Image: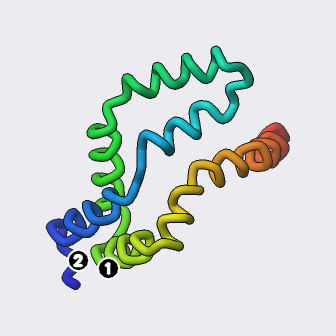
């Protein structure tokens, strides 16, 4: 496929449609909430988010970073049942790696 901006945007649109942004942000923002009150506050804030804007941010970044063929391959794979399952776990994965990455970057960047 020609790697034009038009093709990148078309394929990014296919890919971005697979994201459940509300669920993804809800999981990320409530993962550290230890009380029901904290989860409620986070949920209220998430409800105020403009997910069309979030989607547009993802769409623009995808079209900027990836080629049309890469985006088509992502949309094809993540559109499958196993791909959807992996994509649905992305927020949980990101949350799981943060403590270890923070510990390692703190260790390395705290040294002169």
Give the image's coloring scheme: rainbow
Q: Residue 69: x, y in percent? A: 32, 79
The quadrant of the image that shows the C terminus is top right
The tag earlier along the polypeptide, 2 or 1, is 2
Secondary structure of the residue carrying tag 2 is loop
Residue lying at 67% horizontally and 45% vertically, measured from the top left: 95
The quadrant of the image that shows the N terminus is bottom left
Whether residue 34 is situated above or below residue 100 in the rendered picture:
above
Q: Which mark is residue 69?
A: 1
Q: Is residue 112 visible?
A: no
Q: Residue 63: x, y in percent? A: 29, 61
Secondary structure of the residue carrying tag 1 is helix
Residue lying at 58% horizontally and 49% vertically, measured from the top left: 91
> Which residue is nearer to you in this view: 37 or 49?
37
Query: What residue is shown with label 2?
Result: 3
Q: Does residue 69 appear to the left or right of 111 in the view shown?
A: left
Mark 2 and mark 1: Cα distance apart in space:
7 Å
- Asked if the residue at tag 1 contacts the one at tag 2, i.e. Cβ–Cβ closer than 8 Å, the answer is yes
Residue lying at 42% horizontally and 49% vertically, measured from the top left: 20
Label 2: how many Cα within 10 Å (few below 14, some 14–19, many 20+): few
């Amino acid at each position: 496929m020609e790697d034009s901006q038009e093709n990148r945007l078309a394929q990014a649109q296919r890919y971005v449609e697979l994201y459940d942004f509300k669920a993804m942000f809800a999981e990320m923002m409530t993962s550290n909430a230890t009380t029901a009150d904290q989860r409620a506050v986070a949920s209220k804030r998430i409800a105020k988010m403009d997910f069309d804007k979030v989607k547009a941010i993802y769409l623009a970044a995808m079209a900027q970073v990836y080629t049309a063929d890469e985006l088509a391959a992502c949309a094809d794979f993540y559109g499958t049942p196993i791909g959807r399952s992996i994509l649905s776990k992305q927020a949980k994965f990101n949350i799981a790696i943060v403590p270890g990455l923070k510990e390692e970057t703190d260790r390395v960047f705290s040294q002169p």
